């Protein structure tokens, strides 16, 4: 069966520090991968999506970047965190557009 | 641009009641629609996925309907239980290959 792993679960980072969040999917090949952010009191915001290795689409220009070094690995990064980067980050995958999303358990990021 | 709204924003009901959560979308040319549940501090759990050719989907006490022409979907929860307390989100995929657009969610509290 397919599973999605996301880590860490919680992260507290100082302003200006780097960030690396990792998401991996097991049990499927060539998934579509997504990074979402959910800020307090706000809805889900699509940050990046990828349809294949090295193929990244950015939905919102900001302080973050994403990479897909392997088929089932999706990484969210920042060189210098801002206070406004705080939020709940969720990774999701989908095998094709006919199917829905499956989400990871999320990472709570607090920038202090 | 597809916009998704959910009414009400919050709902509190006594245990055992049947209830309906609403989801509206502005562009009726959708590919599929997915309902999720989110517990506090957790990721999203998929509940039901409805393809554009379907009118409804059922899973246990949950029934989701879709009316594309009116731009609406409803999630019916039968015999509500305190364990149903969570935020419920709907998401709409507009066209083939497009990403899901999420509604803001309805926060449900089922009182014992």
Image: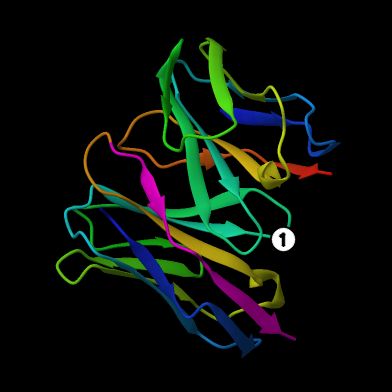
Q: Work out whether residue B91 can be spotted.
A: yes
What is the x, y in percent for residue A48? 48, 31
What is the x, y in percent for residue A77? 65, 24
Left or right of residue A95, residue B24 in this image: left
The quarter of the picture where the C terminus of chain B appears is bottom right
Residue drawn at (61%, 40%) of the image: A90
Up-down: is B69 above or below A15?
below
What is the x, y in percent for residue B51? 27, 50
Q: Nearer the viewer, residue B36 or A61?
A: A61
Residue drawn at (57%, 59%) of the image: B37
Q: Nearer the viewer, residue A111 or B10?
A: A111
Up-down: is B105 above or below A35?
below
Magenta-highlighted stretch: main secondary structure? strand
Instruction: Give the residues in magenta.
Output: B98-112
Q: Secondary structure at mark 1?
A: loop
Q: Nearer the viewer, residue B20 or A60?
A: A60
Q: Chain of mark 1?
A: B
Quarter of the view holding residue B17: bottom right
Q: Any magenta on residue B109?
A: yes
What is the x, y in percent for residue A16? 78, 30
Left or right of residue A83, residue A62 in this image: left
Residue drawn at (35%, 30%) of the image: A96
Q: Any magenta on residue A23?
A: no
Residue drawn at (70%, 77%) of the image: B82
Task: Give the class, few, some or many, for how many residues have Cα within 10 Å of label 1's Cα (few <14, many ≥20).
Answer: few
Give the residue pinned by disc 1.
B40
Up-down: is A20 above or below B50?
above
């Amino acid at each position: 069966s397919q599973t999605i792993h996301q880590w860490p679960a919680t992260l507290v980072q100082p302003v200006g520090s780097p960030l690396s969040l990792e998401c991996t999917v097991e049990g499927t090949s060539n998934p579509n991968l997504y990074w979402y952010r959910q800020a307090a009191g706000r809805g889900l915001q699509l940050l990046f999506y990828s349809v294949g290795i090295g193929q990244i689409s950015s939905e919102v220009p900001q302080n973050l970047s994403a990479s897909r070094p392997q088929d089932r690995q999706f990484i969210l990064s920042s060189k210098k965190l801002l206070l406004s980067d705080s939020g709940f980050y969720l990774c999701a995958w989908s095998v094709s557009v006919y199917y829905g999303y499956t989400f990871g358990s999320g990472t709570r990021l607090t920038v202090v | 641009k597809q916009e998704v709204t959910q009414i009400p924003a919050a709902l509190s009901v006594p245990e055992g009641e049947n209830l309906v959560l609403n989801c509206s979308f502005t562009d009726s040319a959708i590919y599929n629609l997915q309902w999720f549940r989110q517990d506090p501090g957790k990721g999203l759990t998929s509940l039901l996925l409805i393809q554009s050719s379907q009118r409804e989907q059922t899973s246990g006490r949950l029934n989701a309907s879709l009316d594309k022409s009116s731009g609406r979907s409803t999630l019916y929860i039968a015999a509500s239980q305190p364990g149903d307390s969570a935020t419920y989100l709907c998401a709409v995929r507009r066209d083939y290959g497009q990403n899901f657009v999420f509604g803001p969610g309805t926060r449900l509290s089922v009182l014992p």
